[in-house]
Image (spheres, rainbow, N blue to C red):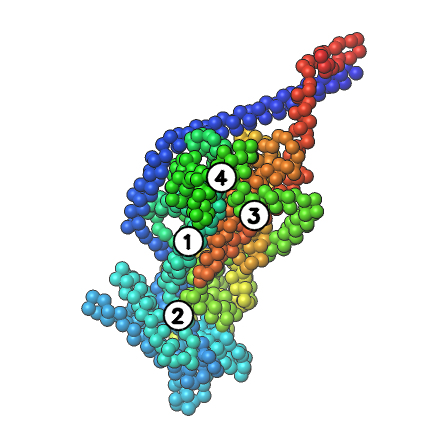
Amino acid sequence: MLVTRRWERLATRTLFLALALLLHSRMLRQVLHEGLRTSFHKLGHFVANHPVFFASAPVLISILLGASFSRYRIEENVEYLLAPKHSLAKIEGNLVDSLFPVNRSKHTLYSDLQTPGRYGRVIVTSRRGSVLDPHHVNTVLKLHNTITQIQVPMLGFNYTFAHLCLLDDSKSCIVDDILRVLEEMRLARASNRSIPTLYYPITRLKDGREAYIGHQLGGVQAGGGLNGVRSARALQLTYYLQVASPLNEVVAARWELLFCRELDNFGKAHPELGLYPFTSSSLQRDFQRTSRVSERPLLFSLAVCLSLAMLCCSMRDCVRTKPWLGLLALVTVSLATLTSAGIFNLTGGKYNSTYLGIPFVMLGHGLFGTFEMLSSWRRTREDQHVKERVAAVFSDCMLPFTASTALHVVTFGIGASPFTNIEAVRLFCRNACISVLFNYLYILTFYGSNLVFAGYLENNYRHSLFCRRVPKPELLQQKPAWYRLLMYTHYNEEAPDAGPLHAYESHLLLAFMKRYYCDWITNTYVKPFVVLFYLVYVSFALMGYLQVSEGSDLSNVVATETSTIAYTRAQQRYFSSYSPVIGFYIYESIEYWNTSVQEDLLEYTKGFERISWFESYLNYLHGLNITTSLSRSNFTERLRSGFLLQPHYVHFSDDIIFAKRVDGEFDVVASRMFLVAKTTENKREEMSILLDTLRKLSLTSRVKFIIFNPSFVYMDRYASSVGAPLKNSCIAALFLLFFSTFLAADPLVNAWLTVTVTSVEFGLVGFMTLWQVELDCVSVLCLIYGVNYAIDSSAPLVSAFALGRESTRTRWVKLALERHGVPALQSYLCYGAALLPLAAVPSNLTRTLFRCLFLTAIITAFHCLAILPVLLTFLPPSKKKRRERKNAAENSEEIECVEMVDSTRVVDQITTV
């Protein structure tokens, strides 16, 4: 019994302690909140006292830093930007290059768009018939002859392909094996001999050597024997160049330009063939071309946004209309962009096409800040001094705007950290972080000082456009009709009892929001349909979320009407049957003569098309009726002195590295084979799965091997590298919202913001996928910005509702929409109009940018103008309990706690005196 009484007393005291701590934390939040508001109030006074300085300083800084565009440079290394920095493929590539130099073996280690070094490549297609028809064969050989005779004048010497080509061991230019096949076919027809059978994908050449031609012959139809080729729709020719010196590099770059020009002329002269050229510089050139083709649409976008911003700030009242403030909102963003670009140039940065998204990040951030300030200005009392009104605007707007800016800096700062594995994402986040910071400072200073000037014009009843004083109503009636229309305004003396917003109700959006939309969205019969529509939204978002795919294809970031896209489409159409050539490298000495090791190697390569010295050597031994289970010395000696000296096996010498042992015998210390997998149209996805499978096999196998192809550098860890910045930024945003709870006047504000951001991001990922946007570096950057954009939009609305102390939920939802729904709607309209011209840019990068940002604006608007207003009318925070607490506090007497002790128990009793 005594223990029970003690537990009761302890529980009661714990309850009172918890209530005291809750009250204390609430008081602390209110003190901090009011302290920050007071600080911004003083800052507003300071800006209003020095408007000329704060209006001119940002302009001068922008001009000075803008002069640094003389240092404008472009990043030319696409692999540096788009390939994961830290990946196993790069380590494997370095190991492979130390054993078998990739630049010398790139003709055998074929890759589509990621071949290292300099080269020229062309896909030749026949518009009618087969490319193996006699007249097409002659035309292709004529094209080959034309390409090899291209001359590059340099330092008084004409360089041709013979001077620049990659050489084999016999010092001859390396050309594709399909050209030897075509030459044999032409000679056979010329001498009336039977044409040798052409096999696919591995054929046998005239000298007895086996050659893989799966990447050189496409659109193949089999017939006439086992794997015999009856017809083919396309073939691919590649001309590899060496870059042994800086002069070689310059000459090779010019040769590539002449290569494309010569193919264009040849295609016009022979319309029966389709030619699709591609060079080592095509990807970089077409990646940067997005910036050039976007110039006019971006200027048009700025003009549209500027016009709509001025229109959104205009009203019939010539004194209270603020079109210049709409213009200055865009000027503020432009000055911040110029300043951040100047800093970027001075720090040695290089531009790339992904930076096209930074102005839209700044635009979305700046529009919310400026329109919120203008909306707060309309709510101030007109009989106050301008400085007091500006201080009130800063006190009202700058706290949530500062919090959203801090969130921008944190999320983009996390993306700019060294943990980000893709350089394009890291550089974008770093520059976006700097740009948003200057955007915030310039809105605070430049736009705030211009608000002071506009306030003086308004207080003196001067026309907002012409700065001419507007006559009073009795004098205005004596003027002509056009003059009265032009100079119409509302004097406060006309209706002194009118509400504070009476003069601004002629604003179209404000009148629409107050008189129509607020009553409609909070109508009892409308709410169920909004909730039902939200459930449909979640269903479609989930359907898209389950279909998310990574977009490691490099053609997703280049301009559309380019040679890269034309080449990629032809590649996918005619050459998607087989994967790029995969190098299978055994990097340590193993017992090749051991029967079990031989069986393991044959098992590993089973199911692939193989170009293998090991398998050819075993067949060679079988052909001589010699067992493959030889001793070490016999196995190696027959390999060196017999097999590799045969004319049709001598090319395997490049695939084996011998080392002399202490006892004078030779040993195979490293070797390589080439594997090709059968693929379908989803080549990249299948290659990624194959890479993971072979990697896992290499960890468990007793044969130590690695696999490599230049395209693996882009595939390896791409999904995790792309998703990591988004995941880290979202986690940082959630932690920031959680730990900033003590700064908010009500903890439920951060809870609602977290729910809103989660819903917006979930819908954005789902609908982005349904709109055929893959998860690549550009879409991930848009998703990171989506977190900030959703908080920018919803924070003022939720805060205004949560801070309401009296009246009902519905009433406070209406008041929150009247105060913050109008600037949000203005921002959505201007931002959406600015995005529309992006849809006309012929580029895959800007297409992804437009779709993601447009979906961000649409989904956020749906949440802030429809979902949140409806849900807040019946979900916490409650207004009824606050009214009851307030009434109880007003009617209650002094309360004291009296402890009563008797012989049986100790009881805490609360007695009202």
Compare marks 3 and 1 and give the one earlier in the sequence: 1
Query: What residue is drawn where x is 52% and y is 66%?
Result: 677
Q: Say what secondary structure mark 2 lies in.
A: strand
Determine whether label 3 and label 2 are within 8 Å by CB.
no
Q: Determine which of the numbered discs, if any, sits on residue 303 in the image.
A: 1
Foreground residue among 218 and 23: 23
Q: Position of residue 325 (x, y in %)?
A: 43, 43
Foreground residue among 416 and 43: 43
Distance from Cα at disc 4 to Cα at disc 1: 31 Å
Compare marks 4 and 2 and give the one earlier in the sequence: 2
Distance from Cα at disc 3 to Cα at disc 1: 23 Å
Distance from Cα at disc 2 to Cα at disc 1: 38 Å
Badge 3: residue crowd in 10 Å (few <14, some 14–19, many ≥20): many
Tag 4: amino acid: His
Front label number (3 vs 2): 3
User: Among all residues in the image, which is located at the extreme bottom?
Assistant: 192
Q: Quadrant of the N terminus?
A: top right
Front label number (4 vs 2): 4
Q: Say what secondary structure mark 4 lies in.
A: loop
Tag 2: amino acid: Pro
Q: Where is residue 140 in the image (x, y as percent from the top left)?
A: 39, 79
Determine whether label 3 and label 1 are within 8 Å by CB.
no
Q: Name the residue under label 2.
A: 277
Count of number-bearing discs: 4
- Tell whether 216 sits left or right of 224: left
Foreground residue among 668 and 791: 791
Compare marks 4 and 1 and give the one earlier in the sequence: 1
Q: Say what secondary structure mark 3 lies in.
A: helix
Distance from Cα at disc 4 to Cα at disc 2: 69 Å
Q: Determine which of the numbered discs, if any, sits on residue 861 in the image.
A: 3
Query: What residue is drawn where x is 31% and y is 70%?
Result: 258
